[in-house]
Image (cartoon, coloured by chain):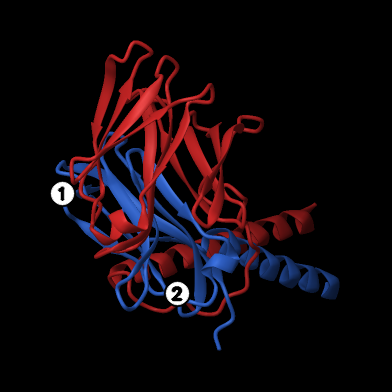
Amino acid sequence: MKRLVVALAVVALGGFGVGSALAADWKPYTGPGEWFQPGRSASGFYDYCGLWVNNTFAKSETGWGLVTFINPNGNWSYGVQGRGTIRSNLSLAQSRGWVKKPHCKNNSGAWYQGGCFGYIEPQQCA
Amino acid sequence: MRRVLVIALTASAAIGAGLVLAVLDRTTEANRGGEGRVGARSSVSVVPDAGPSLKLKPGSRKLVGELALRGKNLRLETAETWDGAECLLQTEAQGGGASQCFESGLFGLSRIAFSVSSDGGPDVFRSLYVLGVAAPGVASVMLTRTDGSVVRVDLDRTRAFVIESSVEDLAANVLPARLEAFGPSGKRVDSVAIPALR
């Protein structure tokens, strides 16, 4: 009986960890399939306690849009613009040492549907 | 047997609870308007070199070319995702990069698949380049810039191209405005307007 309880605890804790790890780090910062009118933009949160390594704008492939990372002074880095689904990827080395938030924008003159999300590498907070 | 069943059910419930909590965490952040702090969390890194959100069909990556820019070298590839989209991948030698995927294929929408990559801005960009690949039958591409100047590039057999803005052009806010594709006879076969980059 004691062995069963230990096994259950191990499995439960492990399973909880697996579930959290699988789903915790994708961070949408708009809803999926939202309408983007011309000029509409959205931003995620600053990575004070993590490292953004991806910024993706999944959208109608005829629509132009941009993704970039913005630091607290408003400066842009690692921007990509184009049609289709666009992604900007940072290596951990590129992401370390500066605070940033992911940003996406419909910089075209047309309406379209899309969603913006990114991937954050968890880091220990100081 | 019953013991195994109990363990299996408990494991499923725990995994489910983990997923639900993670999704709730995500939803809460979205409801905060996307502003907030990420708590310390330990997790397994799942970042493949094409970027975490890209699930590529095994064996579909094809090297188009390697391109040298000011301060960095880029590897340009095409690939297919598991759900059938075709992508243009740019990878920097030191890691990181960008990608662009089309459900209708690289040339379903246009004879030129390209993106504009930049650093700096939004007021003045520090670096900026137009990078892409043209469909078979395209012999050259021409970039028209906001000051009316043009840059024409004859394509080699890879049909890859990169047009990088000079520091002077960026300081003067001269930016890409239109990209056109031409066949071997010089006939224009496609023209794509590039919207304002901000």
Write down the chain letter for disc 2. Answer: A
Quadrant of the frame with the C terminus of chain B = bottom left
Q: Residue furthest top?
A: B185
The earlier-in-sequence mark between 2 and 1 is 1
Q: Name the residue under label 2.
A: A47
Q: What residue type is labelled 1?
A: Gln
CB under 8 Å between callouts 2 and 1? Answer: no
Q: Name the residue under label 1.
A: A37
The chain coloured blue carries which letter?
A: A
| Residue drawn at the location 31% of the way across and 15% of the way down | B186
Q: Can residue A79 be seen in this view?
A: yes
Image quarter for residue B6?
bottom right
| Residue drawn at the location 59% of the way across and 66% of the way down | A92
Give the colour chain B carries in the figure. red
Q: Is mark 2 on a helix, strand or loop?
A: loop
Image quarter for residue A9?
bottom right
Cα separation, mark 2 vs mark 1, equals 27 Å
Q: Is residue A70 above or below residue B130?
A: below
Q: Is residue A33 visible?
A: no
Which x, y percent locates residue B56?
Answer: 58, 37
Q: What element carries label 1?
A: loop
Instruction: State left or right for residue B23 relative to residue A81.
Output: right
Write down the chain letter for disc 1. Answer: A
Which x, y percent locates residue B188?
Answer: 27, 18
| Residue drawn at the location 39% of the way across and 19% of the way down | B138
Which x, y percent locates residue B1?
Answer: 80, 52
